[in-house]
Image: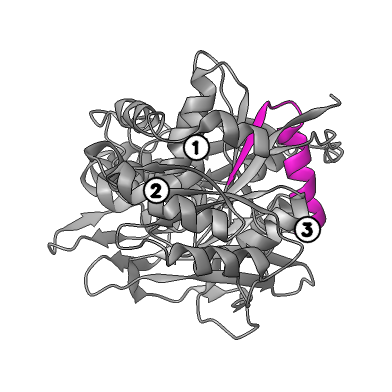
Amino acid sequence: MAGKHSAFLLAAPSSGSGKTTITLALLRTFARRGLAVQPFKCGPDYLDTRLHTMAASFGGRERAGINLDTFMASKEHVQGLFSRYASDADVAVVEGVMGLFDGAEKSEGSSAEIAMLLGIPVIMVINAHSMAYSAAPMLYGFRTFDSALNLAGVIFNQVNTASHYSYLEAAARDAGVEPLGYVPRSEAMAISERHLGLDTSAGYDRESVIKAMAEHIGKTVNVDRLLEIAQVERPSASVRSPSIAGGNKLIAVARDEAFNFVYRENIALLRQYGRLVFFSPLHDERLPEAEMVYLAGGYPELYAEQLSANSAMREQIAAFSRSGGRLYAECGGMMYLGKTITLKDGSVYPMCGALDLETTMQESRLTLGYRSVVLDGSTAELRGHEFHYSRISHQGALQNIATVNNARGEHVATPLFRKENTTASYIHLYWGEMPQAPALLFSLESE
């Protein structure tokens, strides 16, 4: 599909500026206009891509959020993903991560690097609650720091009056960046982004929240001008990789409120290994017939009582693992495979007991960062991200089968456990461009 379309990366000087709420509002605004809008997220965040999917899917059209990460994948793979998913879109919106130039090492893997890699302009979001003309040197610095970056416009957040915006507008123009409007403080935009992702209960109305966000920014942001200055050449669709030879496995994948942290490209690659059947450890009474089982990450701690009460499912998953079934679990999935989960209030809930480990939310702290993983006996390097608040409180005689490093090449103690054909870890691995990854993780190489 030749010609031009609109594409831009929404960035900020730092986290907490309002990128996610404004991204969601713009996605829904474009979708309500009847435009095919494709969302992307810089970095490894799997929560934001879920929210992007909700905001961009409107009127019977679904557009899934896609991660773009130059640590977990090659630059060529990231370019290919963007081309594949954006080629048929009227608008491509990429939400940045952290500050514009914040990467795994200096600016490597940053939002700025990805914008330049894709050849798309950057729109800054600045929290101007306590700022006026000082926005000029800030914007000038971001615009001129790297001459290859196209900083095309700015949206000011947390601005209550048109008078306040007039100072900011002048500052932006003096810095050589086009002002595109402002977003006043309001209840619609003040809703916690993380709460929007964390509250997975059926009673939480995300749809109304996203609709309110879109209506709010439409009053003071020049969306038409944004689409104009973001015009770029439409990318050509990239060709998918060939199917895996002998891909005839029956694969059960956990997917419900408790288990839903998964990269779309992981699932796409897993489909090349066979037919996928989705099931719910929360609600289903039986584990589907399968040769492989994938327990993705999620929030088992939020549903510990329900997961524990479903003893039939717990017993079947444990039996599958103990009988040599090929099972891979990451983060929340690994917690579910353990003996118990202890919540912050001290309550203890039995889990599957397939692995001799126990996890707890007590005395825990955030563990996060990029990870590179090399399995024992393999030269292939898997890459991913670790993000969790829980910790292992008891670990039995479990075998660690990998060497794990962070983005700076420093050793990290996070293990990758294997017991017979069950593999589990706290690390969320990205397999998108490594066809052999599922074979390694599900122990298929031993067949």
72 relative to 377, above or below = above
The image quadrant that residue 419 belongs to is bottom right
Horizontal arrangement in the rendering, residue 410 relative to residue 256 (left or right): right
Q: Amino acid at mark 2?
A: Ser
x then y, percent, for residue 355:
42, 62
Distance in Å between CA atoms under marks 2 and 1: 31 Å
* Mark nearer the N terminus (2 vs 1): 1
Dot 3 falls on a residue whose secondary structure is helix
x then y, percent, for residue 299:
35, 49
Q: Are marks 2 and 1 in contact (CB under 8 Å)?
A: no
Find residue 169 and name its label: none
Magenta region, residue range: 74-94
Q: Which residue is mark 2?
A: 166
Horizontal arrangement in the rendering, residue 146 relative to residue 224 (left or right): right
Q: Which residue is mark 3?
A: 75
Residue 89 lies in the magenta-colored region: yes
* Mark nearer the N terminus (1 vs 3): 1
Dot 2 falls on a residue whose secondary structure is helix
The structure residue drawn at horizontal position 42% and vertical position 50%, both measured from the top left corner, is 156
Number of other residues with Cα within 10 Å of mark 2, as a class: few under 14, some 14 to 19, many 20 or more: some
Q: Amino acid at mark 3?
A: Lys
